């Protein structure tokens, strides 16, 4: 996480799912719903703080970059 020129940048990486994990996820509605809820929350944060969200796949990982246009106290986000 970095804070530059009135922008907050949050970068993280997550391993891509294996084929077996992806198959299990397709049949596990609770996990799919949790992932969908997480993405919706990130999109809502982007709207509130005039930000952007970018997810890229590379070398077996998801790279996520969240950029917010204003300084944000994410702990107080409702």
Image (cartoon, rainbow, N blue to C red):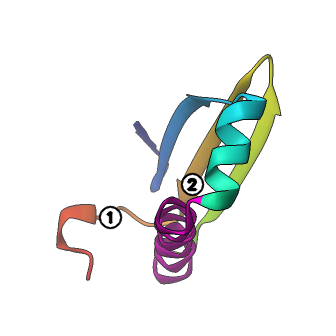
Residue 73 vertical position relative to residue 49 in the rendered view, above or below: above
Q: Which residue is mark 1?
A: 72
Q: Position of residue 56 (x, y in %)?
A: 78, 40
* Residue shown at the point (80%, 16%) measured from the top left: 59
Name the side, left or right, on which 20 lies relative to 3.
right
Q: Residue 69: in sight, yes or no? A: yes
Number of marks in picture: 2
Q: Quadrant of residue 43?
A: bottom right
**Residue 61 belongs to magenta span:** no
* Residue shown at the point (75%, 20%) measured from the top left: 60
Residue 59 vertical position relative to residue 17 in the rendered view, above or below: above
Q: Which residue is mark 2?
A: 67
What predominant SS class does the magenta segment belong to? Answer: helix
Q: Position of residue 57 (x, y in %)?
A: 80, 34
Residue found farthest to the top: 59
Name the side, left or right, on which 71 lies relative to 11.
left
Q: Mark 1 to mark 2: distance in Å?
A: 11 Å
Residue 25 vertical position relative to residue 46 in the rendered view, above or below: above
Q: Which residues are magenta?
A: 28-49
Name the side, left or right, on which 5 lies relative to 23.
left
Among the two numbered marks 1 and 2 on one chain, the one whose residue lies closer to the N terminus: 2
Name the side, left or right, on which 34 lies relative to 66.
left
Q: Nearer the viewer, residue 48 or 29?
A: 29
Q: Position of residue 68 (x, y in %)?
A: 51, 61
Q: Nearer the viewer, residue 67 or 64?
A: 64
**Residue 44 belongs to magenta span:** yes
């Amino acid at each position: 996480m970095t804070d530059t020129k009135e922008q907050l940048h949050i970068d993280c990486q997550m391993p891509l799912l294996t084929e077996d994990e992806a198959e299990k996820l397709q049949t596990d509605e609770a996990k799919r719903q949790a992932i969908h809820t997480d993405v919706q929350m990130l999109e809502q944060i982007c709207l509130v703080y005039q930000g952007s969200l970018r997810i890229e796949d590379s070398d077996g990982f998801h790279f996520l970059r969240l950029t917010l246009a204003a300084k944000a106290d994410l702990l107080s986000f409702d």
